[in-house]
Image (spheres, coloured by chain):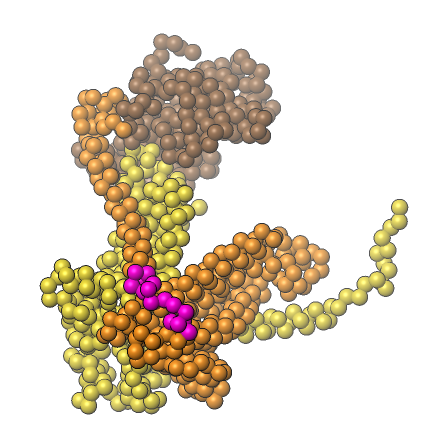
């Protein structure tokens, strides 16, 4: 039997130097790619801060926070941001009061009641619902839900927060459902067994043991959904209207923060004009609002997450 | 066995299969009142499976199927008129890994009592259960703390306290000490000996010393390979614990208790 | 199942009201069935909403679909208006988004998962990516407006296809990175160890052993991210995509429109005939999405079978 010629160096031509260079180049280039995401964040924050700063050189912070009207494009301009915030808050409130019960109950149904086979049909259907573009939901809200609600609600106007909020709620329900389901499925079976072994019924097990154990995940899914609702644009632009109005009346047209940005963008807003800066001031407010929610969610999860082995 | 002893639980010709493959076959067994019965045997011998039949926890496992008959106080627990929820309230279970609910210590105890409609004073019940489980002194100042903040051994005693709070007749314990350190194990064993005045206990254990220390009767299960490559368990011998350990009738029991396999 | 607790004395276990316990099982079961009914209702409702949504759009718009509709430019007359410029615009934008976001996202994912040491830098990027996922898409539009439309106007040509595509690429970049990292993480570490043990460099191991296995997941994740980008309207409106375009783009610096913006424009007109157009446009949009999602699934199945 012949022995392999291990020391016959003529057979091997290692390219160690080249390899090391390729390795370094790859690491450098891909590291730069990773930095693009950091640059995006910095870009967003820098742009918003810069233009918002410019905005506040022309409009006082006090009137931005205390004016009761939002008329930035009129000659007698007023900049009460809370006019837009009130609409956004009302729309998100309606949305989450639809999405929370619907999404949470669906999550419970999928993880605790549906058979694996049924679940494998239902989950993709929810994903389809989640993947439907928001402009389609806007169509649905304006041309199907609003006429329907008008037929049962006297005095409901053609643009209103109610139908926009309800459809917005439907659009974020799959998010609540799928993230809550993840949290519920992650609750160890041993906890359920513990409850059953004490003579708890299925509902008692779910409500008293499973849901509390999944609480941090459920809350973070709801917060994420609220922040999605706040940033959602097309449904509220199409169905809630373009009428800045302070207050929480869901039956009349209102203007959400995102709807203003769309309205202003569709018009002529040359760079450097006050209208242009106003878009960024509203964008900044929107960004801060969602950032607060994200930070709260992050804090909540860290504070209340239960650790299981 | 003492035939005159009153049997709380009685298994007759019990076989269990999961998704068609038999896990344990043809078990006959009586659990006498106010005694400790230990189930021992190598892994895969079906001792936990049988245990989980006694309060129908196996109902919760998809594909599990039981044949034969199990009676609790002479009532067939698999009869259509028997509700597993009702049964589990009287035949409770403590699990291998401590599984306190992610709630306060107090709420862990109160939960079972509350859902089962306890009419008495809850504070008193919580205190008494924790005392019976020999953990009161360690937790009496932090009843509002999470049950998960306790050590493993404390968690397991909390789970036992949680079980006795609903005043069951039988406590099933599925390897309750396998996740615990030796000192915690000792405390749980002492607890078992104390509880026997009021309860009937069935304990599955891998630890033969534990079986000989705490139990009055011992059932030895063994497993044999099936044609399909799986394992099928069966009951080899069931007798007073001292007989199983010092005077077993079967060769396999002799070999197992003397540590030759398993 | 028989109820035992309505009359505890009849319970075969005799446990209905032992001592100071009042189990009241029948009452508890009534609440149980109400609860499970609520859970099933919620799921059924969601499925019905989906069916209603698709059904409504089909009923409203199917009759309007025709070859002419797909090959006509928009028009002031609803009956003559078509989708051509929007359809072509969507295809242009998507190709560029894919070309930009795929290498960037996969490269960044590989760096973070395979090359980066566990340093504050890597953790900062990770937190940053998670945060980016929570930023509303319209904010990306504001970024694109400032950076691509204003500052980089000499390159992008202002309110152009390129500006729109780059904005959307940044929007989906976090999704591609996360999908890449998850697919890489699913490849067993033993495979990498085996490669290293034979004297391969990290890049050789990643390139030859890890990537081929992770590719199905990466591709699926990227296509799903792209299909999200297709439906995005708000950021493109912000950077100034036009709603009325009666010519086809010639290069990357051309003005453009895309399907959802055309649909948005038609919905926001008062005339009913335009609403019909928007329904037909939605059918096309959903058709494109369906095509992409099913190709993602097929691709994954195909690649998984090959390995």
Q: In which quarter of the image is residue B231?
A: top right
Q: Give the range drawn in magenta.
A: C57-71
Q: In this view, does A62 lie above or below A170?
A: below
Residue lying farthest to the top in this orientation: B4
Indicate the colour of chain C: orange
Q: In this view, does B257 lie above or below C80?
A: above
Identity of the residue drawn at 35% across and 12% down: B5
Indicate the colour of chain B: brown
Which x, y percent locates residue C157?
A: 45, 86
Can the viewer see residue B43? yes
Which x, y percent locates residue A53?
A: 32, 85
Reply yes or no: does residue A215 show up in magenta.
no
Which x, y percent locates residue B108?
A: 30, 41
Identify the chain drawn in yellow: A
Along the viewing direction, whichever of A216 and C221 lies nearer the viewer = C221
Q: Is residue B92 above or below residue A290?
A: above
Along the viewing direction, whichever of B41 and A163 lies nearer the viewer = A163
């Amino acid at each position: 039997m012949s022995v392999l010629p291990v020391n016959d160096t003529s057979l091997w031509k290692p390219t160690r130097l080249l390899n090391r260079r390729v390795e370094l180049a790859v690491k450098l280039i891909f590291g730069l790619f990773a930095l693009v995401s950091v640059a995006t964040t910095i870009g967003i924050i820098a742009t918003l801060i810069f233009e918002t700063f410019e905005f506040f050189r022309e409009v006082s912070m006090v009137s931005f926070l205390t004016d009761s009207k939002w008329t930035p494009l009129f000659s007698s301009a007023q900049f009460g941001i809370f006019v837009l915030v009130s609409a956004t808050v009302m729309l998100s409130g309606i949305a989450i009061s639809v999405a929370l019960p619907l999404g949470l109950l669906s999550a419970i149904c999928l993880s605790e009641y549906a058979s694996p086979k049924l679940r494998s049909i239902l989950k993709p259907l929810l994903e389809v619902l989640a993947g439907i573009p928001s402009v389609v939901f806007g169509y649905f809200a304006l041309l199907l839900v609003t006429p329907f609600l008008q037929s049962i609600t006297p005095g409901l106007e053609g643009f209103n927060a109610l139908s926009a909020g309800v459809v917005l709620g439907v659009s974020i329900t799959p998010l609540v459902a799928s993230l809550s389901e993840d949290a519920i499925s992650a609750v160890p079976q041993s906890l359920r067994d513990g409850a059953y072994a004490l003579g708890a019924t299925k509902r008692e097990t779910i409500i008293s043991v499973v849901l509390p154990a999944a609480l941090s995940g459920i809350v973070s899914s709801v917060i994420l959904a609220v922040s999605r609702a706040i940033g959602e644009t097309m449904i509220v632009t199409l169905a809630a209207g373009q009428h800045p109005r302070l207050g929480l009346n869901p039956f009349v047209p209102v203007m959400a923060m995102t709807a203003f940005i769309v309205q202003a963008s569709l018009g002529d807003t040359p760079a450097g004009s006050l209208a242009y800066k106003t878009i960024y001031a509203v964008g900044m407010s929107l960004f801060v609002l969602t950032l607060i929610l994200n930070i709260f969610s992050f804090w909540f999860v860290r504070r209340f997450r239960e650790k299981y082995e | 066995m003492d035939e005159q002893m009153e049997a709380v639980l009685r298994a007759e010709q019990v076989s269990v299969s999961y998704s068609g493959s038999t896990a344990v076959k043809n078990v006959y067994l009586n659990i006498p009142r106010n005694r400790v019965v230990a189930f021992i045997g190598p892994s895969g011998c079906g001792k936990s499976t049988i245990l989980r039949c006694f309060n129908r926890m196996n109902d919760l496992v998809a594909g599990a199927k039981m044949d034969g008959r199990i009676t609790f106080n002479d009532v067939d627990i698999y009869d259509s008129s028997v509700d597993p929820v009702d049964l589990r309230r009287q035949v409770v279970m403590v699990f291998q890994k401590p599984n306190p609910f992610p709630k306060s210590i107090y709420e862990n105890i109160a939960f079972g009592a509350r859902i089962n409609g306890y009419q008495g004073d809850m504070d008193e019940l919580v205190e008494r259960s924790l005392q019976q489980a020999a953990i009161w002194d360690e937790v009496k100042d932090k009843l509002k703390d999470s049950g998960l903040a306790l050590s493993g051994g404390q968690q397991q005693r909390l789970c036992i306290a949680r079980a006795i709070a609903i005043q069951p007749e039988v406590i099933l314990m599925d390897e309750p000490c396998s996740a615990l350190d030796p000192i915690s194990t000792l405390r749980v064993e002492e607890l078992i000996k104390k509880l026997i005045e009021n309860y009937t206990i069935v304990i599955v254990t891998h630890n033969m010393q534990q079986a000989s220390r705490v139990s009055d009767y011992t059932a030895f299960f063994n497993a044999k390979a099936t044609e399909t490559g799986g394992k099928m368990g069966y009951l080899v011998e069931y007798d007073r614990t001292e007989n199983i350990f010092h005077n077993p009738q079967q060769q396999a029991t002799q070999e197992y208790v003397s540590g030759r396999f398993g | 199942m028989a109820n035992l607790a309505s009359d505890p004395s009849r319970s075969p276990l005799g446990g209905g009201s032992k001592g100071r316990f009042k189990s009241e099982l029948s009452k508890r079961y009534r609440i149980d069935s109400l609860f499970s009914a609520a859970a099933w209702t919620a799921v059924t409702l969601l499925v019905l909403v989906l069916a209603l949504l698709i059904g409504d759009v089909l009923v409203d718009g199917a009759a309007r679909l025709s070859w002419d509709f797909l090959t006509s430019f928009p028009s002031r007359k609803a009956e003559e208006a078509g989708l051509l410029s929007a359809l072509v615009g969507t295809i242009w934008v998507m190709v560029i988004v894919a070309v930009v976001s795929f290498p960037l996202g996969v490269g960044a994912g590989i760096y973070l998962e395979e090359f980066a040491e566990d340093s504050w830098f890597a953790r900062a990027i990770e937190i940053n990516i998670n945060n980016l996922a929570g930023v509303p898409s319209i904010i990306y539009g504001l970024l694109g407006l400032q950076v691509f439309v204003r500052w980089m106007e000499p390159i992008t040509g202002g309110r152009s296809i390129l500006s729109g595509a780059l904005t959307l690429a940044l929007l989906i970049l976090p999704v591609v990175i996360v999908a890449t990292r998850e697919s890489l993480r699913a490849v067993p570490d033993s495979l990498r160890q085996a490669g290293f043990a034979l004297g391969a460099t990290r890049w050789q191991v990643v390139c030859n052993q890890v990537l081929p296995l992770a590719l199905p997941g990466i591709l699926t994740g990227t296509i799903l991210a792209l299909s999200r980008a297709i439906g995005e309207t708000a950021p493109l409106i912000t950077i100034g995509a036009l709603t009325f375009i009666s010519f086809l783009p010639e290069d990357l610096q051309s003005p453009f429109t895309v399907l959802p913006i055309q649909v948005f424009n038609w919905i926001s007109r008062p005339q009913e005939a335009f609403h019909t157009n928007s329904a037909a446009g939605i059918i096309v949009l959903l058709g494109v999405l369906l095509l992409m999602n099913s190709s993602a699934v097929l691709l994954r199945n195909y690649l998984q079978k090959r390995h």
